Structures are given as structure tokens and as C-alpha cells.
């Protein structure tokens, strides 16, 4: 299939936006490909009463960004730049 | 990095190789904006005036609302939640020649005119772009958790 597009005049009076958020895009212009993905997770079980599940630390926790390991001194948090 | 004889680099930044917009001057549209008002731009939000080739925005967030203070309620790790590792569903393009789409664009009018843009806030890897681009890809993964204080053990009764 051949899809032929002719763009004639496009003029807009004004645009009023309250908020652009979470990897969204507002563009005045052309783009060849745009792909936007969003994943939200707010299930019922995300409401926790009491401590977080007493699980052991996740795999790779020692490389986690910006987290203290248990037993470490309470110092400033260091964030690794990759 | 080298462009039009000008060399520049950011030491330690470890940036990927730049890709440049293939400028086909004969079929480009110009964006004309009379004015833009942005109140707040935060959290890796981008306001770009000009053309670009490729952009990649990524947001990972653990939105944790706690009744108890952070030092007492425990640490939270991105690694604990599958949402941050879950693969993106792939776009399945048709492969047979009958459903292969070839797009041709002709810009009869070379301008996109916009009067005034008023934005209260742009944030969390959001992008506001005035200009032409080639590919844009952005991804956000947000996990919401509400954590309440558990019931405390009852103190021993006075004899």
C-alpha cells in the first residue's frame, strides 16, 4: 500500500495545557516515529499495613541506586553514575 | 563528537554516538510559535526549541506514601518489583508485501503556525518540543505503594 499525505495549512490559535507529565510529549512539528510507553501499577495489594513483606534483599541489591544496605552507617546516600 | 568541523566532548559523560537529522530541506515544515509560557519545568522535563534527530526518555518511579518515617519503615528497592523489568510489548509489523505501507508526505504549506502556548507544568521526563524530529521514544514505569503503620504490640499491663 502506498499512503500519500499532503499537508496543507495548519494554524492553531492558542494551546493551553495544565500539565505534561510521565514521559508524555507535546510537539509543534513533524516526527517520523513516536513510541510512548507507560506502565502503572496500583493494585489493591499495593496498600500495605505494617512493614513491607519481610523478604530478603532482592538480587543485585548491593548495586541498587541510592539505597543504604542494612547495617551500614547512616551516611549520605551515594548514587552511581553509569 | 564532531560536527561541521567543531569538536566537542563531555569528559566522563559516556554519551552514545550522536545521530544527525537527515535534512531534506525541500520537504521540511517550519514551526512558528508566537509565544510560549511555561510556569514550571521539573524532574527531567525538557523544553526544546529547534530540530532534533533522536530522543529517548525514561522514567522509573516508586511512588511510596508512608504513614511512618522512612528510617523506620524500611528501604525500598526497584529490584523488588517486576514492573521495572517487564519487557515492553513488541510492535508486530506485517511482513508480507501486501500489507507493507510506504508513506509519502508532501508539505504543501511549509509552516505550522501556533499562536500562544501556555503550560502550567511539565515534569517527569515530559517533553515540549517546537521543531522537527525523527524518532521519539519514551517510557514510564510507575509503581504506587501506600504503607500504613502496623499495630504496635500492647505494653504489659501494670500489676
Image: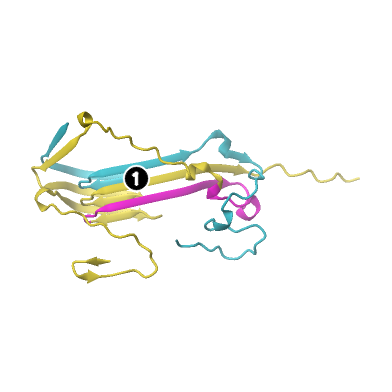
Q: In the image as oriented, which residue stretches furthest toward the top?
A: B98
Q: Position of residue B137 (x, y in %)?
A: 32, 47
- Left or right position of B129 against B76: left
Query: Residue A62, located in which quarter of the rendered image?
Result: bottom right
Q: Quick check: B123 above or below B89?
A: below
Query: Does residue B8 appear in this view?
Result: yes
User: Quadrant location of the N terminus of chain B?
Assistant: bottom left
SS for dot 1: loop
What is chain B's hue in the picture? Answer: yellow
Residue in the foreground of this view, choosing between A34 and B115 = A34
Residues in magenta, as a range: B50-79
What is chain A's hue in the picture? Answer: cyan
Q: Position of residue A30 (x, y in %)?
A: 20, 46
Tell which subunit mark 1 falls on: A
User: Quadrant location of the C terminus of chain B?
Assistant: top right
Query: Residue B5, located in which quarter of the rendered image?
Result: bottom left
Q: Residue at x 50, y 43 (%)?
A: B143
Q: Position of residue A7 (x, y in %)?
A: 12, 40
Q: Residue at x 30, y 53 (%)?
A: B38
Q: Quick check: B49 above or below A43?
A: below
Residue B53 magenta: yes
Q: Position of residue B121 (x, y in %)?
A: 35, 50
The residue tagged 1 is A24
Query: Does residue A21 appear in this view?
Result: no
Amino acid at each position: 500500500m502506498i499512503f500519500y499525505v499532503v499537508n496543507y495549512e495548519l494554524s492553531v490559535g492558542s494551546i493551553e495545557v495544565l500539565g505534561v507529565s510521565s514521559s508524555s510529549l507535546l510537539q509543534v512539528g513533524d516526527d517520523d516515529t513516536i513510541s510512548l510507553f507507560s506502565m502503572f501499577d496500583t493494585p489493591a495489594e499495593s496498600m500495605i499495613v505494617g512493614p513491607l513483606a519481610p523478604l530478603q534483599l532482592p538480587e543485585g541489591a548491593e548495586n541498587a541506586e541510592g539505597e543504604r544496605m542494612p547495617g551500614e552507617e547512616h551516611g549520605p546516600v551515594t548514587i552511581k553514575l553509569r | 563528537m564532531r560536527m561541521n568541523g567543531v569538536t566537542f566532548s563531555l569528559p566522563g559523560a559516556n554519551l552514545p554516538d550522536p545521530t544527525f537529522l537527515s535534512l531534506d530541506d525541500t520537504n521540511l515544515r517550519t514551526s512558528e510559535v508566537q509565544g510560549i509560557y511555561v510556569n514550571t519545568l521539573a524532574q527531567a522535563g525538557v523544553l526544546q526549541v529547534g530540530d532534533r534527530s533522536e530522543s529517548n526518555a525514561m522514567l522509573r518511579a516508586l511512588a511510596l506514601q508512608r504513614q511512618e518515617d522512612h528510617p523506620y519503615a524500611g528501604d525500598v528497592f526497584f529490584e523488588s518489583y517486576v514492573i521495572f523489568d517487564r519487557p515492553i510489548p513488541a510492535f508486530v509489523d506485517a511482513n508480507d508485501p501486501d500489507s507493507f505501507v510506504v508513506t509519502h508526505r508532501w508539505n504543501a504549506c511549509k509552516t505550522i503556525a501556533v499562536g500562544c502556548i501556555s503550560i502550567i507544568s511539565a515534569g517527569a521526563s515530559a517533553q515540549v518540543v517546537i521543531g522537527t524530529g525523527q524518532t521519539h521514544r519514551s517510557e514510564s514505569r510507575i509503581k504506587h505503594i501506600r504503607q500504613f503503620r502496623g499495630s504496635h504490640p500492647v505494653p504489659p499491663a501494670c500489676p
